[in-house]
Image (cartoon, rainbow, N blue to C red):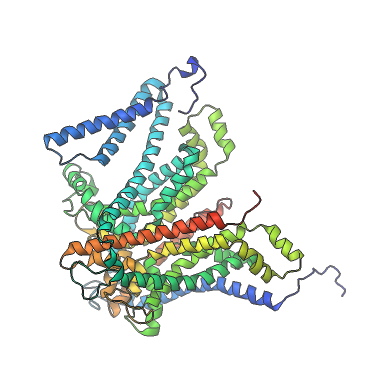
Amino acid sequence: MAVSTTAGNALTTGRLPRMAPWAILLACWLVVAGVYALFAMSGTLQDFSLVGTLFFGTVLYIAIIYVISLSVEGRRQAVDRLITALVFGAFLVALLPLVSLVSTVLANGLARFDLDFFTMSQRNIVGAGGGALHAIVGTLEITAVATLISVPIGLLTAVYLVEYGRGQIARWITFLVDVMTGIPSIVAGLFAYAVFAIVFGPGVRMGFAGSVALSVLMIPVVVRACEEMLKLVPNELREAAFALGVPKWLTILKVVLPTSAAGITTGVMLSIARVIGETAPLLLVAGFTQSMNYDLFDGRMQSLPVFVFTSYANQGTDGDAYLARAWTGALTLILIVMALNLIARLIARFFSPKTGR
Amino acid sequence: MATAAAPIRAKQRPGDRIFSGSALAAGSIILILLAAVAIFLIAQGIPGVLAQAGDTVILGEKNFWQYVAPLAFGTLWAAALALLMATPLSIGIALFISHYAPRRLAQTLGYIIDLLAAVPSVVFGLWGGLVLAPLVRPAYAWLAENASWFPLFSGQASATGRTILTAAIVLAVMILPIMTAICREVFLQTPRLHEEAALALGSTRWEMIRMAVLPFGRAGIISAAMLGLGRALGETMAVAMVLSPAAVISFIVIGSTNPNTIAANIALSFPEAFGTGVNVLIATGLVLFVVTFAVNAVARWVINRRKEFSGAN
């Protein structure tokens, strides 16, 4: 594969034919499939496993290609082929959990993906039935307020870092923003609890505290995204504005920000997608409940990730109904996150400024 | 008016002052926020650190340090296992995307890996607890039967599959995207001429990677591993929903008594905690905060030392 084989015999001797690896791979899969079929027929295994076939077939291929290449092409080529197979294998291994996760969430989540799920809460419901309206409302409210807190702070910080920030303070802010992206979400939840417990007394649970916790996680992401976007604005635009005598703040407000508006929107949507699935901080400070609660400042508020967690962890009688709701909640959550990602990418594609390409 | 070479200063308008002031204020809020996180955690955590055996239900018959030791061990152990699995895998995936995949497909394949990062952690937890744990149970039983000479696999296999190894697998999947993204970025920045020189000298693709790409990307790989470690240390829900915990220090990865992690323990115990128990949990969170902060700071420092390479985000 690495060397072109068109030049003639002298170059192709001592090399495996081009299609040989693929043929060997196919043969390995077929052999393992045959072994599986034999086991299945003799009753040792319950059923034929496609994933198992692909996995063990690939392992067999890795061993065989090394041995064959070693005997035909020598050690160096053999190692090269071995690594090539391993690298392809690594990618396929990473795909396995993604495929498995998406397929199980779809298969189990569609059962309760009905009107009830989006129009009813869990109040007074034991066992089957009910829905997650209270959780969806809670998630939307908490995330919206977190966005309202994070975007102004994050955007202004990015403006500071790109347009004003020089020297020690800017360097420290950049460094700490980077470090802040790594704060564990549960620590953000504990922080919000610690702050609100001082004001409202111990045992406080309210949706707004959840928003604060999410903001701690969201601000660094917004800063990073906006910073990247502001840096993309060509310096010529700023210089043109300055040359016309426009003050710096008006230049930023009327030239820099509108130019990067699409990118900033994309970044904000991606950061919303990042925090909307956060469970741990909301579990700590927003708590969980079975009832509707529209008031961010009064009492426990359910959210979709916490709904999934509590349905899974506190299964009541008729556990399957709780698990079915958990899967549907997970499906809803994934759909929301995917939709946000998709919209963000579409905005980035269609509304980004047309640079001279 | 004697100093002729005085620099020309722009006229300071009120709008400028207000705008730059508010931008600076927003930047300072981040510094204050981080300080506030530390201060509030310390203030609320100190009573927990000082709590004695028998003070709260959560501590039971132990003092704080005896309580936090198995949790800290579990956190480090689970993160280390996850890192052990994710590091070679992410290097492989990054190499695949940067040097092996067809050029036209590479970006799409990168997006697919990034999709893993978009899945909320609670969904990973659900998947780990309900799909992965039953799936790996037979493998654990087989290991316990045939590989019990290996210290990590000794003893009885867990009947549920909810062991620390399962949790570590889920963690590994969750930290793959960020580690892959960083490795991919440094691998792509290998000087083209180094690669071409290696190929021109007759090396195979792997020899080219070993001689040109990997040495160049070593710092990037290290910082990717550190960032992955930071993520794995702080990850809560995946562990809380997969692991069936016990307060032990044990290296056995397939048995039924597994050490819990700090984050998962907080998530599971906090809703029922009251009084000093809350302070104890906050103090454990403080321990976690310090550890992850240190890991992340070192990772970022390593990344920032190479200015030409911008890091994960």
Image location of residue B57, percent across then percent down: 22, 76
Q: Quadrant of the N terminus of chain B?
A: bottom right
Q: Is residue B295 visible?
A: no
Left or right side of B120 for B133: left
The foreground one among B103 and B26 is: B103
Left or right side of B308 for A199: left
State which quadrant residue B239 falls in: bottom left
Q: Residue at x 37, y 84 (%)?
A: A200
Using the image, determine if residue A122 lies above or below residue A299: above
Q: Residue at x 68, y 67 (%)?
A: A251
Image location of residue B99, percent across then percent down: 48, 38
The foreground one among A19 and B305 is: A19
Q: Is residue A298 visible?
A: yes
**Residue farthest to the left, as pictured:** A43
The foreground one among A343 and A4 is: A343
State which quadrant residue A321 falls in: bottom left
Using the image, determine if residue A152 lies above or below residue A76: below
